[in-house]
């Protein structure tokens, strides 16, 4: 398929006459392979580099984990077992199964879709992975399976009408109902790893899982919020056996990370967030630095703690923007330098100019504010509107990395 890498799938589909030797079924399979490789080459570079690797239909390619997020799962599991066994109950395309299997002596892949099983079996054998493929449901497989050191589950997040869902009970399989069976099939020091929707209410999900797992004394659920390029891609919940006599050890740890940045992961507990105290806002904002945490930290809910750890002042209790007089290096998010504070809302002098408009905890949407200021999208300037100490305020700012790139 390498010879087709410079032609789009739309153009190739129009060249049916050149491939008359292929049956209609073979032609559809050929197009599926070319499109699959084209769509996932950047997302799954390891697979793209393997000759005769098979690709599933478009939807499966779109919904599967990226290599980057799959390798992060390997990272958080790494070192837990030296020679264990793994079970992926919702195998799908097999991306997570493939990379997790690096850590285990033996892995079982379970998937209800027969075609996905056929593709996975071919690919796993091609890569010489010790993975057994089982074409059955998660519930049926668990009824007679052995115990595992890691059980991984990525439930389908679409209902019978194809609409997206994100609550645990609405996914397929129903994680809450299946959890007792998962815990029963764990080895004594085993763990359950759940890949869930970026829209998940993390607090409610932990409450649901904890309520079901109370009969298995000492299990808590740690959280990983995983973003790529400032977009949350996955929320991971992983069970952990803990010492209930140690109060500090019963608090789930929450890790927020953006894999596309070289920032350190931001790890905390809910108790740390509750106890954190933000510095009071003081001094002039013009000329100061403005900070917005990355999407993973905001999803994880570290609103006060991120300010406390980096010594920042919070603009408003309900505005998740922060400031400092001197630049804080390696902040996990975006940083601007405020040029005008406040920036006047009059369109005079701003008409037909370009700016990137952001609103945070502000009465107007970005589109409404652009219209009011007669601004066009683009350029290096940022107009940032938010509440500061309860008062709607607008800043004119520029990105710190843009400033650095010019020097």
Image: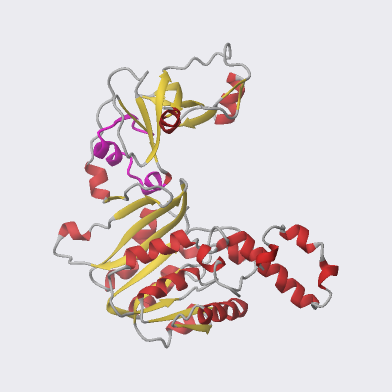
Q: Which residues are magenta?
A: 296-320
Q: Residue furthest top?
A: 348
Tell me if 71 is positioned left or right of 373 in this view. left
Q: Residue furthest bottom?
A: 144
Q: Is residue 324 magenta?
A: no
- In the rendered image, the quadrant that contains the C terminus is top left
In the image, residue 71 sits, relative to residue 123, either above or below, namely above
Which residue does the image show at 81% across and 72% down from the upper left? 19
Residue 194 % position (x, y): 41, 66
Residue toward you, 69 or 211: 69
In the image, residue 219 sits, relative to residue 332, either above or below, namely below
In the image, residue 389 sits, relative to residue 227, either above or below, namely above
Residue 289 % position (x, y): 35, 27
Tell me if 282 is positioned left or right of 17 in this view. left
Residue 331 % position (x, y): 33, 39
The quadrant holding residue 106 is bottom left
Residue 156 % position (x, y): 53, 66
Which residue does the image show at 85% across and 69% down from the upper left? 17
- In the rendered image, the quadrant that contains the N terminus is bottom right
């Amino acid at each position: 398929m390498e010879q087709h890498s410079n032609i789009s799938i739309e153009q190739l589909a129009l060249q049916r006459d050149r491939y008359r030797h292929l049956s209609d079924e073979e032609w559809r399979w050929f197009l599926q392979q070319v499109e699959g490789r084209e769509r996932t080459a950047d997302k799954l570079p390891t697979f793209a580099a393997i000759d005769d690797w098979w690709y599933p239909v478009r939807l499966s390619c779109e919904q599967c984990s990226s290599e980057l997020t799959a390798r992060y799962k390997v990272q958080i599991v790494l070192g837990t077992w030296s020679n264990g066994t793994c079970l992926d109950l919702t195998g799908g395309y097999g991306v997570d199964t493939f990379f997790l299997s690096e850590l285990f002596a033996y892995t079982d892949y379970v998937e209800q879709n027969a075609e996905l099983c056929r593709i996975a079996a071919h690919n796993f054998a091609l890569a010489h992975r010790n993975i057994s493929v089982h074409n059955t449901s998660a519930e049926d497989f668990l009824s007679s399976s052995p115990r595992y050191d890691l059980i991984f589950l990525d439930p389908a997040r679409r209902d019978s009408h194809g609409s997206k869902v994100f609550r645990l009970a609405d996914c397929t399989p129903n994680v809450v109902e299946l959890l007792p069976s998962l815990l029963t099939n764990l080895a004594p020091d085993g763990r359950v790893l759940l890949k869930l929707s970026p829209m998940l209410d993390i607090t409610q999900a932990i409450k649901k899982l904890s309520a079901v797992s109370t009969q298995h004394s000492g299990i808590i659920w740690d959280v990983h919020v995983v973003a790529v390029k400032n977009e949350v891609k996955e929320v991971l919940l992983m069970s952990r056996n803990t010492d209930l006599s140690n109060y500090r050890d019963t608090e789930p740890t929450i890790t927020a990370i953006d894999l596309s940045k070289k920032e350190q992961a931001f790890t905390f507990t809910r108790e740390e967030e509750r106890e954190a105290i933000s510095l009071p806002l003081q001094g002039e904002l013009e000329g100061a630095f403005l900070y917005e945490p990355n999407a993973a930290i905001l999803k994880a809910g570290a609103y006060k703690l991120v300010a406390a750890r980096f010594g920042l002042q919070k603009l408003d209790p309900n505005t998740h923007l922060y400031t400092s007089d001197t630049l804080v290096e390696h902040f996990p998010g975006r940083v601007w330098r405020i040029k005008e504070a406040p920036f006047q809302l009059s369109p005079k002098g701003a008409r037909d100019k370009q700016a990137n408009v952001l609103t945070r905890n502000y009465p107007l949407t970005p589109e409404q504010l652009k219209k009011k200021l007669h601004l066009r999208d683009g350029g290096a300037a940022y107009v940032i509107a938010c509440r500061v100490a309860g008062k709607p305020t607008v800043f004119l700012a520029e990105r710190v990395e843009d400033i650095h790139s010019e020097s």
